[in-house]
Image (cartoon, rainbow, N blue to C red):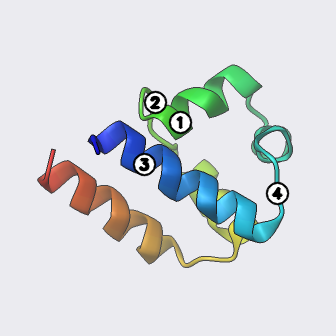
Amino acid sequence: MNTKETRKRWLSSKMQKAGITQGAVSRRLGIDRASMSRVISGEREFRLLEAAEFCRMVKIRISTLVRFIEEQTLFS
């Protein structure tokens, strides 16, 4: 599985577990759905405040998100 697919599955699983849709996340972050799709697909990175709010929404620590992104970067 490639890095983008892994990222997509990981972020999507966090949203699904929290019962939150991509549309709800994009509205809460104040970004359009296309931008959120690019974040999920790995074409765009989260901005710091977006990442913090995403983590609050899906109830994970920001360090968990950072660790995941670092691992993806190291192994890509």
Q: Earlier in the sequence, mark 1 or mark 2?
A: 1
Compared across the picture, whether 20 is left or right of 14 comes to right
Q: Local crowd at mark 1 within 10 Å, few (<14), some, or many (≥20)?
A: some
Do the numbered discs 3 and 1 sit on residues whose CB atoms are within 8 Å? Answer: no
Tag of residue 20 = 4
Q: Circle 2 — which element?
A: loop
Give the foreground label among 3 and 1.
3
CA distance separating discs 4 and 2:
20 Å
Give how far across and how far down residue 28 sits, in percent: 83, 47
At label 4, the amino acid type is Ile
At label 1, the amino acid type is Val
CA distance separating discs 3 and 4:
17 Å
Q: Local crowd at mark 4 within 10 Å, few (<14), some, or many (≥20)?
A: some
Query: Residue at label 1?
Result: 39
Identify the image quadrant of residue 2: top left
CA distance separating discs 4 and 1:
16 Å
CA distance separating discs 3 and 2:
12 Å
Query: Residue at label 2?
Result: 44
Question: Which residue appears at 46% of the width and 30% of the height?
Answer: 44
Q: Circle 4 — which element?
A: loop
Question: Which residue appears at 67% of the width and 21% of the height?
Answer: 34
Give the foreground label among 4 and 1.
4
Question: Which residue appears at 77% of the width and 47% of the height?
Answer: 25
Compared across the picture, whether 45 is left or right of 20 comes to left
